[in-house]
Image (tube, rainbow, N blue to C red):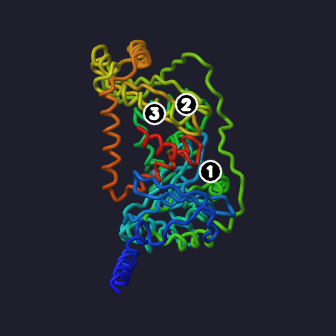
Amino acid sequence: MKKGFILLFLLMTVLLALPALAGSPTEFGIPKVGTEINGFVVKDVYNWAEYLTDVVTLEHIKTGSVLLWLANDNIERNYTIAFRTPVYGNTGIAHVFEHATLGGNTKYPGANTFFEMDAKTSNTYLNASTYSDNTRYIMSSTSEDQLIQYIDYYMSGLTEPLAISNPYAMMREAYRYELDSPEDDITLQGVVYSEMLGALTQERMAYYNYLGMMWPGSYVASISGGEPEHIPELTIEQLRAFHEEHYHPSNATMFLSGDLNLPHILDLLNTQFLSQYDRREIAFDDPNYTPVTPGYHETVFPYPAEEGTPTENAAILYYGHPFDASTATYEELATLDYVTSYLNDESSPFMQTMREKLPGASAYATFSCLSGRKTDLLFVANGLNESDKDLFRSICDESLAQVLKDGVNEDVLNAILTSKRFSRLMSLDNSSIYRSLSNDIYSSQQSYNDLYIWKKEAEFNRAL
Ligand SMILES: [Zn+2]
C-alpha cells in the first residue's frame, strides 16, 4: 500500500514536469534527421550548447533550397531569406533589386506598403541588405502571426516585384530624370542613386580601390550598392534577367529562429512559393576573375577634395596579402584571425612601433574571408601621407615576422579569448541574438562556401 502510494507520487511528479520539458526549447520539438515535413526533409540536427539553441538544417525536396531553424524558446521570431547574387560592374543592380522587392508587387501593389507595415506593426526588425555576393531579406517579430504576414509580403515581392514589369517602379527605385518647370535644370533622382551619393566616403572608396586592384574582375571587388555615375546605365531588361537568374529557391538559404510552429511555416513556404519552381543547378563561381601576378604591386588612387581642404596627413594606406584559401583548414584561417586581434592589441609590437614611428596615424590589421575562400590579411592606416608607405609596409612586415618568430604574449592572448567569451555571453541577453546568429552563419557559409562551416567554428571556439 505504502509502496504503491510512493510510485504514484513519483509518476505524478514526472507527468507534471512533462509540459515544461516539451515547452523548452520549442512547443513543436526537435525533429529527427530524415523526417519529412511539408515538402522539406531534415538533413542535420546540431545542439549549439553555447548559444542555448538547436540548429535544424532542412532541405526543400523539390528545389534544394536550404532552411536552418535555430530552435529555441526566444521571444523574437525571425525569418531571413538570402540569395547568392554575385554582381559585376557598379550599376548597383543587386541593390536596386533589393529595393524593388520592397517597393510593391503584384499581390501588394502599394509603393509604400512596406513602410506602413514597418511603422504600424510591432515588428522588431524589417529590412534587407545587399553585399558583394548576396542579398538578404530579414524580418522579425515577437508575434508569429505577424511574422507570417511579413513572410507573405516579402515572398510576394521576391517572386513578382512591380519593378521588373513596370518601368516607372524601377525608375523610382534606381534613377530618373526630373524637370519641374522649363526654366529649371534637369536633375537626376532615385532612391538608390540618392542613397549611394552619400555612401561612398573616402574610406569606402579606398577599400573598393584596393579590392579592385587585388581581385581584378571578381565580384568581391564590385561596389554592390552602386556607384552613382554608373547607376543610370542600368536597364529594366538587365533587372529582369538578374531576377530570373538569381531569385530562384535553388539559390536561396533561409533561416527561421525562435519558438515557432515549424510545420505551419514550412507548409506556407512550400505551397505558396517554393513548389512553383523546379530544381536548378546554379554555379557559385567567378568567371571574370584573373588573379594578380605574384609579387608586390602598388597603385595610387586620387580622391577628390573640396578646395581648401587640407590634404596633409589625409591619405589612407592599404597593405594586403590576398590569397586563395581553398586548401586551408578552418583552424589555420581562424588562427590568422587571432593573429590580427593580437596585432591590434595596444601592447603588440605593431601598435608600439606605429606609435613610435608614425605617431599621427591610426592603424589596424584585419583578416577576412571575403567570399568563396578568397582570403585577405590586410593592414590599414589612416591619417598619413603617401610618402609614408614604405615605412608603414616595413612596420607591418617586421611585426608579422616578429609574431612568427617569438609567438604571442600569453597574457594578451588570454585577454583576447576572455573578451570573445564575454561578448558571446553578453549576446545571450539580447533578444535579437538568433537573428544576428543567423546572419553570422550565412556570412560564414558564403565566405567559406561550406554549408556546415559554422559547426567547425563552434567546435574550434569550444576547444579554446
Ligand atoms: Zn539601399
Type of the residue with mark 1: Thr
Identify the residue at horizontal 38%, vertical 63% (top origin): 74
| Closer to the camera in the image, 236 or 392 | 392
Label 2 sits on a secondary structure element that is helix
Q: Nearer the viewer, mark 1 or mark 3?
A: 3
- The percent coordinates of residue 142 (x first, y second) are 38, 68
Identify the residue at horizontal 69%, vertical 64% (top origin): 62
| Closer to the camera in the image, 142 or 26 | 26
Identify the residue at horizontal 46%, vertical 29% (top origin): 336
Query: Disc 2 to disc 1, how far (Cα)?
Result: 24 Å
Outermost residue on the bottom side: it is 1
**First along the sequence among labels 1 and 3:** 3
Circle 3 packing at 10 Å, graded few (<14), some (14-19), many (20+), is some
Residue 187 is left or right of residue 357, and the answer is: right
What's the mark number on residue 235? 1
* Location of residue 277 by image quarter: bottom right
| Closer to the camera in the image, 233 or 320 | 320
What's the mark number on residue 212? 2
Tag 2–tag 3 contact (CB < 8 Å) = no
- The percent coordinates of residue 422 (x first, y second) are 31, 44
Identify the residue at horizontal 46%, vertical 45% (top origin): 458
Q: Is 298 rendered above or below residue 364?
A: above
**First along the sequence among labels 2 and 3:** 3
**First along the sequence among labels 2 and 1:** 2
- The percent coordinates of residue 123 (x first, y second) are 38, 66
Circle 1 packing at 10 Å, graded few (<14), some (14-19), many (20+), is some
According to the picture, the residue beneath numbered tag 3 turns out to be 205
Q: Is 157 rendered above or below residue 382?
A: below
Q: Nearer the viewer, mark 2 or mark 1?
A: 2
- The percent coordinates of residue 138 (x first, y second) are 47, 58
Label 1 sits on a secondary structure element that is loop
